[in-house]
Every structure is written in structure tokens, then in C-alpha cells.
């Protein structure tokens, strides 16, 4: 089955620690995204990548870092510099610019990781 | 002012009711309009998308876009308890990669 997997489902972090959230897709999509979801805020874009070895900051990139060494993988690191990291984190992917076959490239979402800072 | 406004609800209806979910937006450059459904503690899934103005129907769901009023709607006919979820509107400006702008989501509760 094609899809997006995120791990872990729940993650607990102590103050001052860096943690890395995993996102893997087997949809052969070029573009991948990380969003943060907070109550009453909707989804906010953290980082996105349109192609391997390239990524761009979204609206709320401060305190986060990413890498895109493989097409299938787009891990997100939440650093100690992120002031309020407790949130629900969602990874998504889409076909991307090069392979778009329709007027809109649907973003497919993973199941999410809930991060709690203790 | 947020680019996309959506009433957070919750909206409670009895089974079988017609549900109307709405979003307003301020950026007239938005061309593509989407509705995502998100069950509790899950990732969103795309329900429908429409381009520019007009209606689009898919089973019990109808999406409507009124660009002159900057207003989009999702109607659910014969609502079911399984429709209980949060519904997020999203929109973007053009083809290819453009950042999606999401509403905050409306929580819908359909009681049997």
C-alpha cells in the first residue's frame, strides 16, 4: 500500500532536548511538507521540500530544522530553540512541480506525531 | 486579520440533517479551494477540491465557491455519525507548488 508513515505516534521531550520526527513516503512524490497543528490555529507550514537536497522555510521555521537526503524521507528536528514545541506535527507529500498531471497537486497527509514537552 | 476565517464550532446536528460548513477569505488571488476531513488524532484527508467559482458534487458532498463574495461552502446531505470530524478548508493561488492556506477547522458532531 502506498502512503505516508510518521513515527513515533507520541513523543515526549524534556526541556533543552532536540528530538527528530520521522516521515517516510512510498508514493514516489517529489514534494514533502511539515505542518504544525495547534488548537484554534489550523495548520501552519514549517518547512517544505520540492526536490531532494533542497528545502525552503515555511511560515514558522524558527527552532526547527530538516534534511532531504532521500526522496522518500523528510525528517524534522525540533530543537531546544523552539519555545513552544508541544503540538501535533503533520507530514505531507504531493507529486510536485515536475510530475504534476492536473490542475492541483493534492497533498497527502501522514497520521501525525503528537509531541509533548515535559 | 487571518487570510482564511472558519468558525471552529462545534456544530451539532442530528443524523440525517443537511450540514453547511463555510469559510471566508480575503485574498482574491486564491484559485483552488479544498475541503479536508480530519478525524480525531489522525491526519487530514482530501474530500473535494474546486477551481475558481461554481459547484462540485460528489455523493453526499457538495462544494460551492463564490469568488465574488470570497466565500466557500461544503454541504453534507443525509449526515451520518461517521461524518463527525473536523472539516478544514484550504486554498492556494495557482498550479504546482503554492503554499496551502488553511482555515482553523470546524468540528462537526452528528448524533444518532
Image (cartoon, coloured by chain):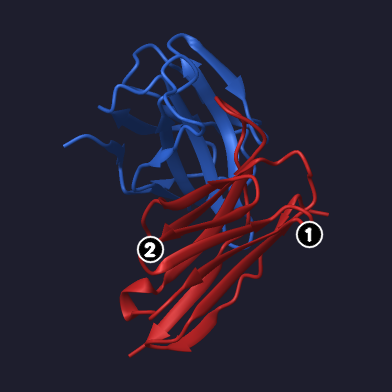
Left or right of residue B71: residue A92 = left
Kindly identify the residue that appears in the image at 50 percent across and 18 percent down.
Answer: A97
Classed neighbour count for the residue bearing mark 1: other residues with Cα under 10 Å, few (<14), some (14–19), many (≥20):
few
**Residue B39 marker:** 2
Residue ranking furthest to the top: A53
Chain of the residue where label 1 is placed in the rendered structure: B
SS at badge 2: loop
Numbered circle sitting on residue B69: 1
In the displayed image of the protein, which residue is found farthest to the front?
A: B54
Chain A colour as displayed: blue
Q: Nearer the viewer, mark 2 or mark 1?
A: 1
| Residue A88 picture location, percent across and down | 47, 51
* The N terminus of chain B sits in image quarter: bottom right
Q: Which chain is red?
A: B
How far apart, in angstroms, are the residues tagged by discs 2 and 1? 29 Å
B76 on left or right of B5:
left
**10 Å crowding of disc 2: few (<14), some (14-19), many (20+):** some
x, y percentage for residue B47? 42, 55
Amino acid at each position: 500500500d502506498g502512503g505516508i508513515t510518521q513515527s513515533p505516534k507520541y513523543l515526549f521531550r524534556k526541556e533543552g532536548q532536540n528530538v527528530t520526527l520521522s516521515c517516510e513516503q512510498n508514493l514516489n512524490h517529489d514534494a514533502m511538507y511539515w505542518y504544525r497543528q495547534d488548537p484554534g490555529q489550523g495548520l501552519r507550514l514549517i518547512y517544505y521540500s520540492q526536490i531532494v537536497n533542497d528545502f525552503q522555510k515555511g511560515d514558522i521555521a524558527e527552532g526547527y530544522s530538516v534534511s532531504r537526503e532521500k526522496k522518500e524521507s523528510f525528517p524534522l528536528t525540533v530543537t531546544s530553540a523552539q519555545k513552544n514545541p508541544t503540538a501535533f506535527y503533520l507530514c505531507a507529500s504531493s507529486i510536485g512541480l515536475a510530475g504534476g498531471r492536473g490542475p492541483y497537486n493534492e497533498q497527502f497527509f501522514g497520521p501525525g506525531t503528537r509531541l509533548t514537552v515535559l | 486579520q487571518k487570510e482564511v476565517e472558519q468558525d471552529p464550532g462545534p456544530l451539532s446536528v442530528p443524523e440525517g440533517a443537511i450540514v453547511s460548513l463555510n469559510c471566508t477569505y480575503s485574498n482574491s488571488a486564491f484559485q483552488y479551494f479544498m475541503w479536508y476531513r480530519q478525524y480525531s488524532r489522525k491526519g487530514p484527508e482530501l474530500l473535494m477540491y474546486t477551481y475558481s467559482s461554481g459547484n462540485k458534487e460528489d455523493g453526499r458532498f457538495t462544494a460551492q465557491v463564490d469568488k465574488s463574495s470570497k466565500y466557500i461552502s461544503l454541504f453534507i446531505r443525509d449526515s451520518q455519525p461517521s461524518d463527525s470530524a473536523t472539516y478544514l478548508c484550504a486554498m492556494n493561488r495557482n498550479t504546482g507548488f503554492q503554499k496551502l492556506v488553511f482555515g482553523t477547522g470546524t468540528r462537526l458532531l452528528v448524533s444518532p
